[in-house]
Amino acid sequence: MQAEKKSDFSKKHPKEAVPDATIRAEIEKRLKGKDKLPCAVAFAIAKDIRRLPKEVGNTADLLGIHLSKCQLGLFGYLPEKKIVAPAGHVDGALREAILGALRDGRLPCEAAWSIAEALEISKMTVSAACDTMKIKITACQLGAF
């Protein structure tokens, strides 16, 4: 049986980078002994302490804490890692919103969230539509991808 390969996400940051103390305290308080930080919890931390989601993601990286349960269904789920599946049909308004928000042929994570809010649909619905349309979602707000 092959050992699970763990990535050291701290390596994607400058060597002199240090975890933010305030964010670290919030992460540790909410993890309660777990080793993975769900996307929704990371966003709650950012909102509660008025910091950017990217700062929370960077601090998690520097602490060696993996992000999990992406709200778009793109990473952090077992056993398949992602849970998003293609949509059977993509509504015209959703299709137009996605196409209108593309950057270099890809949809930024933040734009996916904005589309979901504007159309009053779930983030997973936007992600599933992108999967059907063969559009990659990029620029995770937490820095995971």
Image: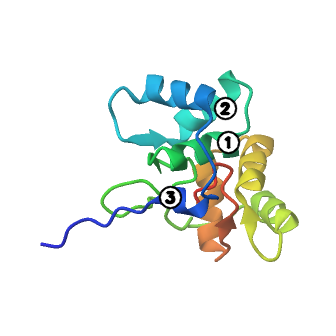
Q: Is residue 96 visible?
A: yes
Relative image position of residue 11 (x, y in whole percent):
53, 62
> Looking at the image, is mark 1 or mark 3 earlier in the sequence?
3
In the rendered structure, are the residues bearing label 2 and label 1 in contact, judged by CB atoms less than 8 Å apart?
yes
Distance from the alpha carbon under mark 1 to that under mark 3: 14 Å
Left or right: residue 52 versus residue 57 is: right
- Which image quarter: residue 6? bottom left
Q: Residue at x 62, y 35 (%)?
A: 20
Residue identifier under label 3:
9
Depth check: 118 or 103 in front?
103
Residue identifier under label 2:
46
* Secondary element at image label 3: helix
Depth check: 11 or 27 in front?
11
Residue identifier under label 1:
55
Considering the image in quadrants, where does the C terminus appear?
A: bottom right
Relative image position of residue 17 (x, y in whole percent):
63, 49
Q: Residue at x 76, y 58 (%)?
A: 94
Q: Residues within 10 Å of mark 2 (few under 14, many from 20)?
A: many
Dot label at residue 36:
none
Distance from the alpha carbon under mark 3 to that under mark 2: 19 Å
Kind of residue sitting beneath label 1: Glu
> Looking at the image, is mark 3 or mark 2 earlier in the sequence?
3
Distance from the alpha carbon under mark 2 to that under mark 1: 8 Å
